Image (tube, rainbow, N blue to C red):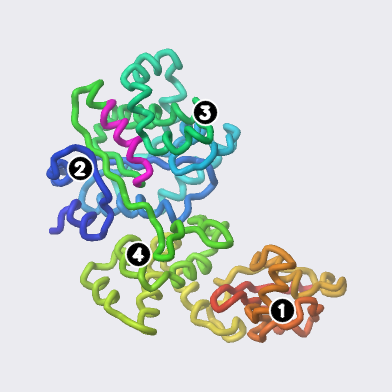
């Protein structure tokens, strides 16, 4: 049986880990039932594709008998992690943070359905109880300003302004690791490579308070071959919540993966055996599309279920929605027939569908030949839509080669 460390290594999950001995992490993961945690903040009501790598790492570890601890930051979200941020995060109201953390907990639970030995915690349960004086005496006394300022996130932000609120974030995350070690015997923290300083602080705090050795592991920061941040598009983030990014859009995101990223993403975001991934990675030219379709289907299945993945696959294979068995997977919106009598134009339809952000973008894209109505190239953005444009009560809008939207006409 392949051990947990080897799985993470051969799939490219390991960026760096704490302690000078190269055998520290392999030795820890060779033990049985190691408790390991990842923290997720509640700054939004959903996680996005950029969070998936840590989720997949936890699922791989769990499949080898280790116990994931999934932490949502009900308290630390109120502070805001400055890591990777050029300016301070917007401060959220407590009610919004609570809603977000509950939504994220439900979302994360989907990836562990049917799996035992998964622990869910919220750091508001312990950080909300400790007094400021007690925290500063217990934790603040163990760190110097000089060593904290070596953290990359702090060095970057000092010149542009760093509040004491954000400066304290590292100490709270360190306390989380110590709390989970004391109360849950947690010995491994996992996070993105931008979390290196925060993770090391937790490792140091446990050593200073308990004299114990624990480990920290960082995952690669996800950049595409074009240098853009993983999960970001011109239209915004690719969310894991189907109400914010539909399964079809999610599928299309993976299907549009750059050729150079396909093998890496198959390793990261699917559970396919490595032998099969290596075969898919050998495909060249137009055949690489087959590997992209496998990636899209497998990634969508993991997040949205096999049923939604099949619907998205059918829709993606369809040239026109009228001939598509899977057209219901394409995002849609209903409009009233009365709207057509009020001079509802193609330019309005593309903005309503969210395919274009402004009238100027519609005009520009139409001039470039990149917009389509029912499979026909749009030449006049101000064309007034008619009932005849809605055969069977539907119209298909298309942006470029791969982005579709269905406009439905309500019945009288």
Q: Of the residues tagged 1 and 4, which is closer to the observer?
A: 4
Q: Residue at x 21, y 41 (%)?
A: 34
Give the quadrant of the N terminus: bottom left
Between 147 and 76, the residue placed more toward the observer is 147
Q: Of the residues tagged 3 and 4, which is closer to the observer?
A: 3
Residue 86, x across and y down, in percent: 51, 42
Left or right: where does residue 355 sit relative to residue 344? Answer: left
Residue 332, x across and y down, in percent: 64, 69
N-term-proximal mark, 2 vs 3:
2
Q: CA distance from mark 2 to mark 3?
A: 40 Å
Q: CA distance from mark 3 to mark 1?
A: 55 Å
Graded by Cα atoms within 10 Å as few (under 14), some (14 to 19) or many (20 or more), the crowding at tag 3 reads: few
Check the image and name the residue furthest to the right.
Answer: 342
Residue 382, image quadrant? bottom right
Q: Is residue 113 visible?
A: no
N-term-proximal mark, 3 vs 4:
3
The span shown in magenta is 193-205
Graded by Cα atoms within 10 Å as few (under 14), some (14 to 19) or many (20 or more), the crowding at tag 2 reads: some
N-term-proximal mark, 3 vs 1:
3
- Above or below, 2 relative to 320: above
Q: Of the residues tagged 2 and 3, which is closer to the observer?
A: 3
Residue 357, x across and y down, in percent: 68, 63
| Dominant SS in magenta | helix
Q: Residue at x 40, y 58 (%)?
A: 223
Residue 393 has which mark? 1
Residue 163 has which mark? 3
Residue 265 has which mark? 4
Q: CA distance from mark 2 to mark 4?
A: 28 Å
N-term-proximal mark, 1 vs 4:
4
Residue 316 on the magenta span: no
The residue singled out by tag 2 in the image is 33
């Amino acid at each position: 049986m392949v051990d947990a460390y080897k799985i993470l290594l051969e799939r490219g999950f390991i960026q760096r880990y704490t302690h000078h001995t190269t055998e520290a992490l392999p030795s820890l993961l060779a033990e049985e039932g190691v408790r390991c945690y990842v923290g997720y903040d509640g700054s939004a009501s959903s996680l996005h594709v950029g969070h998936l790598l840590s989720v997949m790492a936890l699922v791989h570890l769990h499949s080898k008998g280790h116990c994931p601890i999934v932490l949502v930051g009900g308290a630390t979200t109120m502070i805001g992690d400055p890591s990777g941020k050029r300016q301070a995060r917007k401060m959220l109201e407590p009610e919004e943070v609570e809603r977000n953390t509950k939504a994220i907990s439900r979302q994360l639970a989907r990836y562990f359905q049917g799996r035992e030995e998964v622990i869910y915690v919220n750091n508001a349960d312990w950080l909300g109880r400790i007094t400021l004086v007690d925290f500063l005496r217990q934790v603040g006394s163990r760190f110097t300003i000089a060593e904290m300022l070596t953290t990359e996130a702090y060095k970057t932000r000092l010149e542009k302004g760093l509040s004491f609120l954000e400066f304290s974030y590292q100490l709270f995350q360190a306390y989380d690791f110590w709390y989970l070690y004391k109360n849950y015997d947690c010995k491994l923290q996992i996070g993105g490579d931008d979390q290196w300083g925060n993770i090391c602080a937790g490792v140091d705090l446990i050593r200073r308070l308990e004299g114990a050795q624990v480990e920290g592991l960082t995952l690669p920061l996800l950049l595409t071959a074009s240098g853009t941040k993983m999960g970001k598009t011109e239209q915004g983030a690719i969310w894991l919540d189907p109400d914010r990014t539909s399964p079809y859009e999610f599928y299309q995101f993976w299907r549009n993966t750059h050729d150079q990223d396909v093998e890496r993403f198959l390793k990261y975001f699917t559970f396919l055996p490595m032998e099969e991934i290596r075969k898919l990675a050998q495909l060249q030219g137009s055949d690489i599309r087959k590997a992209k379709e496998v990636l899209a289907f497998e990634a969508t299945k993991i997040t949205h279920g096999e049923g939604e993945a099949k619907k998205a696959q059918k829709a993606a294979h369809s040239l026109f929605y009228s001939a598509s068995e899977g057209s219901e997977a394409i995002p849609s919106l209903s409009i009233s027939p009365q709207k057509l009598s009020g001079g509802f134009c193609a330019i309005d339809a593309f903005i309503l569908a969210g395919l274009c952000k402004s009238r100027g973008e519609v005009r520009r894209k139409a001039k470039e030949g990149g917009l389509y109505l029912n499979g026909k190239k749009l030449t006049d953005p101000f064309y007034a839509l008619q009932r005849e444009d809605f055969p069977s009560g539907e119209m298909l809008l298309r942006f470029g080669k791969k982005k579709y939207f269905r406009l439905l006409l309500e019945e009288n």
